Image (cartoon, helix red, strand yellow):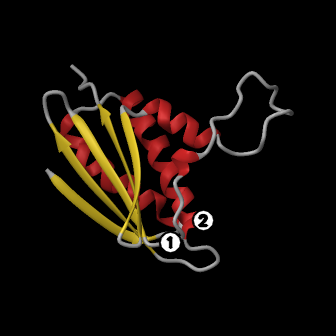
């Protein structure tokens, strides 16, 4: 099953993005914990697009959702035509340092990488394309 959503790349559209994903996953009986992790990943990616891709103007963001069964796997792709930026090239934060000693930022994409099964970035035909896959356990 493949679905897509196009929204303005504005933080105010985050709830629309979450609703789109929840509606697609509703019949799958996903455990609450897995859905919360997915929500956090989606929030990190979408808010970064909304905050930085088109700054100081705005543009569109396209979200493509594809699912497969056995095991249930969700494949989400975020596409924007904003400034080229690969968040996966950002160095992971040094977690051995205290909070006061750490650089600001970087923790969100670090946690995103930890919560998904695979993640990739490409710049194709003038578009940022960030794709991740997550295998979801179905509640019994």
Q: Quadrant of residue 27?
A: top left
Name the N-terminal-most of marks 2 and 1: 2
Q: Quadrant of residue 125?
A: bottom left
Answer left or right for 62 relative to 103: left
Q: Quadrant of residue 69?
A: top left
Q: Nearer the viewer, residue 36 or 121?
A: 121
Callout 1 secondary element = loop
Q: Nearer the viewer, residue 44 or 91?
A: 91
The percent position of residue 5, horizontal first and vertical second, equals 30, 65
Read off the residue under disc 1: 82
Answer left or right for 124 relative to 42: left
For image coordinates 36% across by 36% down, the residue present is 118
Q: Which mark is residue 52?
A: 2
Question: Mark 1 and mark 2 in contact (Cβ < 8 Å)?
Answer: yes
For image coordinates 63% across by 40% down, the residue present is 91
Answer left or right for 82 relative to 20: right
Callout 2 secondary element = helix
């Amino acid at each position: 099953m493949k679905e897509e959503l196009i929204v303005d790349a504005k933080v105010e559209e985050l709830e629309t993005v979450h609703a789109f994903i929840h509606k697609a996953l509703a019949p799958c009986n996903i455990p609450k914990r897995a859905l919360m992790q997915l929500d956090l990943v989606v929030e990190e990616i979408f808010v970064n697009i909304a905050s930085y891709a088109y700054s100081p103007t705005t543009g569109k963001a396209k979200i493509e959702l594809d699912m497969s069964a056995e095991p249930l796997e969700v494949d989400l792709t975020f596409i924007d035509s904003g400034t080229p930026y690969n968040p996966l090239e950002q160095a992971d934060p040094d977690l051995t340092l205290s909070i006061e000693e750490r650089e600001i930022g970087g923790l969100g994409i670090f946690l995103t990488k930890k919560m998904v099964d695979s993640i990739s970035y490409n710049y194709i035909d003038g578009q940022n394309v960030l794709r991740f896959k997550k295998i979801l356990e179905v509640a019994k």
